[in-house]
Amino acid sequence: MKVKARLFDKLDENKVKCHVCANECTILPGKVGICRTRKNFEGELFTLIYGSMISKGTLDPIEKKPLYNFWPGATAYSIASIGCSFKCQNCQNWNISQASPSENGKSGFYTLEGMQNRRMSLVETTPIELVEMVKKSGAETVAYTYNEPLIWHEWIIDTASLLKLEGIKTILVTNGYSTAVARKELIDVGIDAANIDIKSMSDEFYKTICGVKSVQPVLNTAKEFKSNGIHVEVTNLLIPNLNDSVEEIKNLSKWIVVNLGPNTPTHFSAYHPDFKEPSKDRTLFETLDKAYNIAIKEGLNFVYVGNMRHEKGGNTYCPNCNHLIIGRSGYSFTKIDITETKTCSNCKFDLNDVIIGKIERKSSHRFNMY
Ligand code: SF4
Ligand code: SF4
C-alpha cells in the first residue's frame, strides 16, 4: 500500500532525503531509494509496502528468530514484506529481500538479471486486521522478520502501538542499520525485543558483502536499543574465510561484553552457500565450536550455536553457577530447571533480569502458515 513516509526532508529541485535507515538516500523525483520500497512522488516520499505482506503470517517458535532469553517457548506470529537496505551476497531470503514493490504495493517484481519475468503477489493488510489475526492465532508475540523490518518503519510504528494495547510483545529481527531518529521512534513506540545481526566488526566486510558503508550504525542501534530497555540478542553468521577468524570472533565478543553486557545472548550461526555464494563452503562444526569457546572465554554468559547441532550450544546455563537451566534440542525443550519465581534451582540466583518474560514450559510449537 502506498502511504506517505515518515522521516524525510525535502530538498531543492523536488529531491528528498530519507532518514529511515543509515543509507540516508537522497532520492530524485520519480526514483526509489536503495531499498526500492520508498519512492519520491513530486517532492514527497512514500513507502510502497505499508501493510504489504508476503503472506498473512507464519507461526514460529520464538527460538527460530532466534531469541532464547525472551519469553522462552512462546509463539511468534512472523510477518514480512519485501525489500532490504542491504544487498548481502549470502542472503538466504534474497527472493523477498531483493524484490521490488509495484507502485500500489500489491505485488513484487525483480530487477535481478534473469529474473525480470518473475512476480509475486502481496497480501494487503490494515493494522487492525493484523491485530485481529494475531489475537485469533493465540501468539504472544509478533516478529517483523525475514526481509529487513527497519525499512517497514511506518507499518511497524502503527501496528506495534496497537499490539502493545493488546499485551502482545513485538520483536524486530534486523540488520540494525538504523538512524538515531528512526531508533527513537521505535524505542518510543515500545518495541520489546530485537535480534540484531552483527555480521562482522569490519567496515570492509559491510562494504564488500552487504553493499553498505560501515558497521557503526549497527553497533549504535544495538547499544541504544539495549540502553533504552529493549531486550537485545545478537546473531553472527560465520562465513568461511570471510569473518570467521579468531581475531574477528574475539573482537565481536569483546565489543558485546563491553557495550551490551556479558548477559547479552549471542548466537553464532552456520552459513551455507546461497544467492551469490561469497564462499562456496559451509561453516564447519569446528568453527562454530571455536566461536562458542572464544565467546565464553571473553566473558559472555549466554552463547548459542545455530543451524548446527552442538552439545552445549542450544542450552542456557545459569550465569552464576553454570547449572543447566534450559536444555534444548532444536526448538524443543529437553529440560527446564528454573523455579516458578525464575531463580536457578541449584544456586537460587535470580534470573528475572536475564531471562525475560514467562517460560512456556509445555510449549507445543506450531509450524503452520496462518
Ligand atoms: S529506508 Fe534506507 S534504503 Fe530505503 S530509501 Fe530510506 S534511507 Fe534509502
Ligand atoms: S540484511 Fe538480511 S535480508 Fe537484507 S540482504 Fe542482508 S541477509 Fe538479506
Image: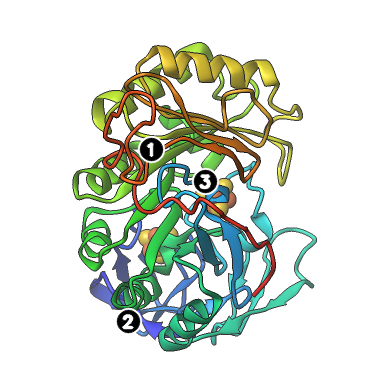
Instruction: Tell me the quadrant of the picture where the C terminus can be found.
Output: bottom right
- Residue indicated by mark 2: 44
CA separation in Å, label 1 and label 2: 28 Å
Q: Which mark is residue 214?
A: 1
Q: Residues within 10 Å of mark 1 (few under 14, many from 20)?
A: many
Q: Work out whether residue 307 or residue 48 is closer to the camera in this orientation and state it.
A: 307
Residue for point 23% across, 65% down = 185
Mark before the other along the chain sequence, 1 or 2: 2
Q: Work out whether residue 57 or residue 221 is closer to the camera in this orientation and state it.
A: 57
Q: Residue 121 sits in which quadrant?
A: bottom right
Are discs 3 and 1 less than 8 Å apart at CB? Answer: no
For the image, the number of numbered tags is 3
Cβ at disc 2 under 8 Å from ligand 1: no
Are discs 3 and 2 less than 8 Å apart at CB? Answer: no
Estimate the x, y position of residue 211 in percent, counting from the top left.
51, 44
- Residue indicated by mark 3: 66
Q: Judging from the image, what secondary structure is the residue with disc 3 in?
A: loop
CA separation in Å, label 3 and label 2: 37 Å
Q: Which mark is residue 192?
A: none
Amino acid type, mark 2:
Glu
Q: How is the image coloured?
A: rainbow
Residue 240, relative to residue 61: is it above or below? Answer: above
Q: Residues within 10 Å of mark 3 (few under 14, many from 20)?
A: many
Amino acid type, mark 1:
Ser
Mark before the other along the chain sequence, 3 or 1: 3
Residue for point 60% across, 78% down = 56
From the viewer's perspective, tell me whether residue 311 is left or right of residue 12: right
